[in-house]
Amino acid sequence: MDFSTASLAPDPLPGASEIASRMHARYEGVTDLMTSAGVFMVGQVARLCGRTEDAVRLLMEGRRLGSAVPGLEFLIAAELSHAAALTGNRELAGRSHAEAAAARRRGLAVFELWGDLATTRVTLLDGGVRAAVEQALDCAARARACRAVGYELIALHDVVRLGAAPAVADRLGDIAADLPESPARWYARHAVAAARHDGPALHQVAGAFARAGANLLAAEATTQASAAYSRAGRRPGVARVRPAGRPPGAAVWAGPHPRRSACWRSPR
């Protein structure tokens, strides 16, 4: 199941989280396959909602079962490396990434780009922003060659999140024109706003992400908006974006600027 390509309408990720949790509860213990698949989905949604520590905990629990199920071993390890990288846990991210690489199977080539998306985040920890941007661009190019638009969309948006929006703004605009009801429209707006250092537009994008429950993306866009205002020598004239499920006054983002952070799917 791919929750990353759901429309960014109000609360799609909280809704997806509820669905994944129900499925996990329903099938837990039925078979190793169903149990590990449920853990994978719940962990994935937790990451997408910005609950990266919860994602790591859930996926760690599911890793033992996944190791006995061909295919899911790779998916769980790749997802775990992605979530661990977002928390800044270099050791766990690297180890899980190596496990995912070892678990790749010829018959599951369709999922390899999923692992490559996780590689972008692991690369950010070890090689820095430039190497991570190059990895994301390479992943997007390979996804486009395979006509895997969902993977390409996420990889291109990773480039925006990493601070290189001008490199991908046109392509995201093309995808958004073809898929107007997908997240592409907001990813494209994010790219244009970031490329132009447009603080108000970045706040609009952050608000859309927050309403969708994509709290990590909202926080990153808010940080980019603040940087844009600082660059322009002015203070933001809009209210701070509050991630879905957070009480008023809760902190939005206490980490470094996205260009220097270890923060983000694929059909993910």
Image (spheres, helix red, strand yellow):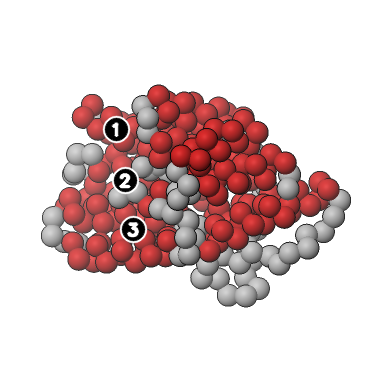
Q: Amino acid at mark 2?
A: Ile
Give me the residue at 57% from left, 43% from top: 188
Answer above or below: position of 80 versus 215: above
Q: Residue at x 40, y 24 (%)?
A: 145
**Residue 208 percent coordinates (x, y):** 56, 58
Q: Nearer the viewer, residue 25 or 7?
A: 7
Residue 96 lies, in percent from the top left, at 38, 40
* Residue 110 tag number: 1
Q: Secondary structure at mark 2?
A: helix
Decide if residue 228 is on the left or right side of residue 116: right
Query: Closer to the camera: disc 2 or disc 3?
Result: 3
- Which residue shows up at 37% across the image and 52% down it? 3
101 w.r.t. 262: above or below: above
Secondary element under disc 1, as helix, strand or loop, is helix
Q: CA distance from mark 1 to mark 2?
A: 15 Å
Specify which label sits upstream in the sequence, 3 or 1: 3
Contact (Cβ within 8 Å) of mark 1 with mark 2: no
Select label 3 or label 1 by which is in front: 1
Q: Amino acid at mark 1?
A: Val
Identify the mark at residue 42; answer none if there is no mark.
3
Query: In the rendered image, is residue 254 in sight?
Result: yes
- Kindly identify which residue carries mark 2: 76
The residue at the far right in this view is 233
Three-letter code, disc 3: Val
If you read the primary sequence from the N terminus, does the residue marked by circle 2 or circle 3 appear first? 3
